[in-house]
Image (tube, rainbow, N blue to C red):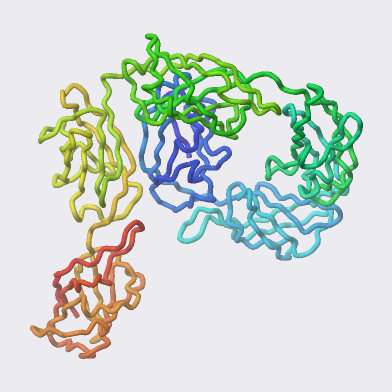
Amino acid sequence: MVVKFGTEVDKATAETLNNYSFDGNKGGTDGFLKATGGAVLQSDKKTVILTLDPTNYTYVKGKAWAVVVEGVQKKDDASQVISKWANTVVIEDTSAPTVAEVTSTANGTTTAVTVKFSEPVKGNGIYKINGVTAAALVSATNPYVVNLTAGEALEAGKSYTLSITNEEDLAEVSGAGNKVTTSKTFTVKGDSAAEGLKTITVVDDNKVLVEFKDDMNPATVTEAEVKVLDENGDQLTATTEYTVTQPDANDDTKFLVTLVDPTLFADSNSRDLTLVVTNAAEDALGNKVASTTKAFKVTKDTVKPVAQSGRVLKNINGEVTGFEITFDSKLTVGTPTTTGIRVINAAGTEITATLGMGTSTGTVAATAQNKLVVSLPADVALSSSVSGEVSILLPAALVQDDAFSKNTSSAKTLTVNLGAADASKMTATIGNGAGDNVFTVTFSEAVKTGAGADSATNPNNYKLNDVVLPANTIITYNATTRVATIELPANYVDKDAADGILTVSGVKNAAGTKTVETVHDVVTTVDQVAPTLIAAKFLSDTTIELTYSEAMEDPNGALVGDEFLIKQGTTAVTFADAELVATKVSGFPNKVLLTVTGVPTTFDLTKAHTITTVDDGAGNDITDKVDGLETPNAQEADVKVDITK
């Protein structure tokens, strides 16, 4: 999915996954965007490519998704937040996947073959290698990859033909994805010897990254196979003095040796050590590596981390939510205390308390280890004192780095621009209210009410899915909280949806000097329209076909004698509940079939008949189709129609 902005935007906030949501599902928190590369700002600084994660996102052809983009800031001016954007987007996929690559490597023979596609697939196709069926399984870590187990051994150096029949992508169309049927020739690469170590790199004062030339068997790259020797050639003790870990489970070439001996630098600020990889380590094909010895040196890091820059963080309304401080080195991941930070505005007035810094919280995340995010306890609107350039006074020992000795940071003062308070701007925030089809709009200042065109209680100033609200919409306004509450008319919404788009525009402030900035946001709508019986027809002297105003839930043999009044001529035909059975009519979602099982067992079709819907007071079984969010609506009661023949 491509998101285009009208101006250059800040890379950090443009690539923040939670700034994008789909039907209320956050790109990051709810996993709707891929964790790596899910949002990538392009070179023009105005375009972001979003990649949805098929693990959590399910493609439905023709479905309109409520997409919200918010919290993205302008490039080089964090004080400016791009206006929130919300709209429905239909995602279409009509292209079948293609085979990008087929690979297989063997030390003699193998049954393992890897097939990489151009997009994620289901792994439900038929795979054959030289006519012999192979078992297929989608990779647990990469949905683009299908791992095959051949039905017979494949020899290194030989070529084979892979045929693929009806493999599907994840674009569900009428219950199936786009399918590919193709064939591909591949050669099994011979590999009878492990290539061994590629490099070792000191990445911190107590960490060494070990990289192999081949994918390794991680079970054979542990403290048992990797040794660390001191200056005297004595081996360090595994686990208590050093550890070996795999930093990325998807990369079997890289392993991290961490020195954890608390006395590592007790006698000297530098250590000359030796890494030994024994020939017990094996590559992914079982080839043993040659025993290798590499010398390396670690030097104690005694340099304090120093803050380099800061920027303000804001919400969609331009209110200050916190600060992001960038340091010159990696920090210890965690939640450092930030309550000692002070903030002074350009006039020399301390606004620490105004911002709530005394109860602020700090976070250093593993994904951005050189940044400290300071979150305020409540969002703060810009004002005459909270605006413009401010000085952020960072106390000493605010954070500590990720070095062996955990050096604490130096004191530093940074300058950050909060932006100018815009006295001419009026905003509104949309939310779901208490009850079905009730919404709230909170205005940033007092607004007009009454019958005027610019009133907050005028339905013409609101749209649901681009349609102006009906005139009989009830809108009330609380002057104390500046909240307008919107109650849609009964029987207005005919479908449950989590992706309704409510739009607010045209409302003026109480003084009539400002007009609210147009805002769109997602709201939840609930189907409250009861299905209405519109026709009835005898199919036989024991069956009646009913036609309703909308799709109906399958009654599934429900007993409904109490839910209808049938008259033969002017005489009511009395049924016990169990003497009238309701079932669906296959292929006709708006129809229900009634079958008589009681007395009389048949109707006299020479006479006129009517049928009236009844509320039996016990929860009717004849209901409309469930849209997804709520229980279905029972049929409209007291509706009478003639039964035709």
| Left or right relative to 451: residue 391 | right
- State how many labels appear: 0
| Left or right relative to 435: residue 293 | right
Residue 510 in picture, x, y percent from top left: 16, 26
As drawn, the residue found furthest toward the left would be: 570
Name the residue at 60% across, 33% down: 333
In this rendered view, identify the residue nearer to me: 605 or 399: 399
Q: Quadrant of residue 207?
A: top right
Picture layout, residue 397 above or below residue 436:
above
Picture layout, residue 185 above or below residue 553:
above
| Left or right relative to 153: residue 580 | left
Q: Quadrant of residue 327?
A: top right
Name the residue at 84% across, 49% down: 190
- Quadrant that contains the C terminus: bottom left
Residue 203 in picture, x, y percent from top left: 73, 29
In this rendered view, identify the residue nearer to me: 85 or 49: 85
Name the residue at 31% across, 43% down: 501
As drawn, the residue found furthest toward the top would be: 347
Name the residue at 28% across, 79% down: 559
Residue 583 in picture, x, y percent from top left: 32, 76
In this rendered view, identify the residue nearer to me: 620 or 74: 620
Picture layout, residue 19 above or below residue 179:
above
Picture layout, residue 492 above or below residue 241:
below
